[in-house]
Image (cartoon, helix red, strand yellow):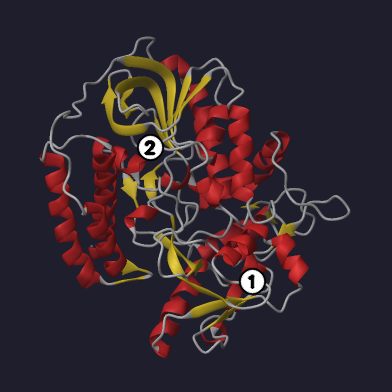
């Protein structure tokens, strides 16, 4: 079976949804949601969205400077300027769409502070801003008659055609469907599941990056991986609960195994240094003390303020047996975000015509080698709008007909061997966590490439296990190749 759309969007997080909202209403659009609609990294974003909007004491130059400093000046300056100068219009737009941000008693918007920011510019909805934005965008998209959303549908493969792109989809009923389009937007999120421990949701397997790579699109700086310094450390679950940057923004202290502050030994900005600096400091302090036990402590603050400011974090920590208002809580760095990805221009177009990438799977260059806190949701909005506007400007250039590519899901063939994803995650955790181990990376790359070769040549049944394993192994191969160069 084959179906046709003007635009196919892979991913239903903030980038994919906002792209659909900004595309012309005359277009037939398909949004592919890999799992259920609420499962995306956007929904997990706690801190907020950074931006200069009705901000009398702040300006876009300050925001730009903070972004460049956090990114070690490896950022694309033009992209950064676009990000910070257009923040106001997209923040205003999502407020119009129903997104609610916390306000002060006088009715003005409350802005918080996070590591690396020189001004209070983080708009937030308590400590669940991502969920607020994603849910309101989804609610609006669901009212659009030209947009179809396919939930629990896995994109298995993508091919270029003479009229655009074809995608092999595996539906909720385990049937296979070919969907064709003139334009495709990849908004598939991050790569967290390439690691043993991550703050990312289960969907973050790098699928969009893999599809783009297989079609020949340029992938850039995939080794720019951010490790968040304050993930809850229960040493048990693969998905680690994030304790937001905003907690340190409100005055939390970082403590070593002796319950002593230590950041003054590493950076004059103390706990409010950028994420990569804090993560490196923790790893260095761990070696110095011979212990990986670290804590975040804000218990000296008023308990009612903390419960109101961080209701989700407070509740989740209580479930783990810790009271944020009364005691330090265990933390340790954990894989969190990807700054590299599918290389795109200012219009979010990849090096392949009419293929776009937005959000975490893309490389706009705005983050440099380290993302400034709360710039991710802003990037998703600004550059997905650019993608939508660019597509709208190109509608007259595409043919009316649709060509369909052929796919072979190898129905009836053997399934992949067990343990591929587990082995890959162990290799990544051992060879590239905060500070790369080049010798381990080189050895791991050999094994990863052997696994990938088998997946590509083995004729395995193309089910979810195969697709996710191939994505994880491909991403790991690219990262380790960059690390060992």
Vertical side of 302 occupied by 211: above or below: above
Where, quadrant-wise, is the C terminus in this rendering? Answer: bottom left
Residue in the foreground of this view, choosing between 125 and 108: 125
Real-space Cα distance between discs 2 and 1? 44 Å
Where, quadrant-wise, is the N terminus in this rendering? Answer: top left
Q: How many marks?
A: 2
User: Going by the image, does 251 lie left or right of 295?
Assistant: right
Q: Does residue 269 appear in this view?
A: no
The x, y position of residue 441, in whole percent, is 23, 66
The x, y position of residue 115, in whole percent, is 60, 67
User: Going by the image, does 181 lie left or right of 299?
Assistant: left
The disc label shown at residue 350, or none: 2
The x, y position of residue 155, in whole percent, is 34, 33
User: Going by the image, does 184 lie left or right of 378?
Assistant: left
Crowding at label 2, few (<14), some or many (≥20) Cα neighbours within 10 Å?
many
Vertical side of 250 occupied by 207: above or below: above
* Residue lying furthest right: 106
Q: Residue visible at 64% across and 44% down?
A: 132
Crowding at label 1, few (<14), some or many (≥20) Cα neighbours within 10 Å?
many
Q: Does residue 112 appear in this view?
A: yes
| First in residue order: circle 2 vs circle 1 | 1
Residue in the foreground of this view, choosing between 47 and 401: 47
Q: Name the residue under label 1.
A: 324
Mark toward the viewer: 2 or 1:
1
Secondary structure, mark 1, is loop
Vertical side of 409 occupied by 377: above or below: below
Vertical side of 226 occupied by 287: above or below: below
Q: Residue visible at 64% across and 64% down?
A: 314
The x, y position of residue 257, in whole percent, is 49, 86
């Amino acid at each position: 079976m084959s179906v046709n759309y003007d635009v196919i969007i892979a991913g239903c997080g903030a980038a994919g949804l906002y792209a659909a909202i900004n595309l012309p209403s005359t277009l037939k659009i398909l949004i592919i949601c890999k799992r259920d609609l609420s499962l995306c990294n956007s929904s997990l974003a706690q801190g907020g969205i950074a931006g200069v909007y009705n901000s009398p004491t702040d300006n876009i130059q300050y925001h730009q400077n903070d972004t460049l400093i956090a990114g070690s000046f490896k950022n694309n300056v033009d992209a950064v300027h676009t990000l910070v100068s257009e923040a106001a219009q997209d923040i205003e737009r999502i407020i119009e769409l129903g997104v609610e941000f916390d306000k002060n008693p006088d009715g003005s918007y409350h802005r918080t502070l996070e590591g690396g920011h020189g001004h209070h510019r983080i708009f937030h909805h308590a400590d669940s801003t991502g969920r607020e934005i994603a849910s309101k965008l989804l609610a609006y998209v669901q009212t659009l008659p030209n947009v179809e959303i396919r939930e629990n549908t896995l994109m298995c493969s993508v091919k270029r055609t003479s009229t655009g792109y074809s995608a092999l989809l595996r539906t909720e009923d385990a049937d296979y469907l070919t969907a064709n389009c003139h334009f495709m937007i990849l908004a598939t999120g991050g790569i967290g599941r390439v690691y043993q421990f991550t703050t990312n949701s289960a969907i973050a397997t790098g699928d969009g990056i893999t599809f783009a790579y297989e079609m020949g699109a340029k992938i850039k700086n995939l080794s720019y991986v951010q490790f968040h310094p304050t993930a809850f450390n229960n040493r048990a679950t693969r998905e680690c609960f994030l304790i937001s940057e905003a907690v340190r923004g409100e005055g939390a202290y970082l403590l070593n195994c002796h319950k002593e502050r230590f950041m003054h030994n590493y950076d004059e900005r103390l706990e409010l240094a950028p994420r990569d600096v804090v993560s490196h400091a923790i790893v260095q302090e761990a070696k110095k003390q011979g212990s990986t036990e670290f804590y975040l402590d804000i218990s000296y603050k008023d308990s009612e303020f903390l419960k109101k400011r961080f209701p989700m974090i407070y509740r989740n920590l209580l479930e783990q047996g810790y009271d944020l208002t009364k005691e330090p809580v265990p933390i340790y760095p954990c894989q969190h975000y990807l700054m590299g990805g599918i290389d795109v221009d200012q219009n979010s177009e990849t090096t392949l015509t009419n293929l776009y990438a937005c959000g975490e799977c893309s490389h706009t260059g705005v983050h440099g080698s380290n993302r400034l806190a709360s710039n991710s949701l802003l990037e998703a909005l600004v550059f997905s709008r650019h993608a939508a506007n660019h597509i709208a400007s190109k509608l007259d250039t595409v043919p009316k007909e649709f060509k369909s590519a052929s796919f072979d899901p190898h129905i009836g063939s053997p399934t992949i061997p067990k343990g591929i994803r587990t082995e890959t995650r162990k290799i990544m955790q051992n060879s590239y966590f905060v500070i790369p181990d080049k010798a381990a990376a080189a050895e791991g790359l050999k094994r990863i490439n052997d696994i990938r070769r088998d997946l590509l040549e083995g004729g395995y049944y193309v089910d979810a296990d195969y697709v996710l394993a191939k994505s994880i192994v491909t991403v790991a191969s690219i990262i380790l190749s960059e690390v060992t160069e």
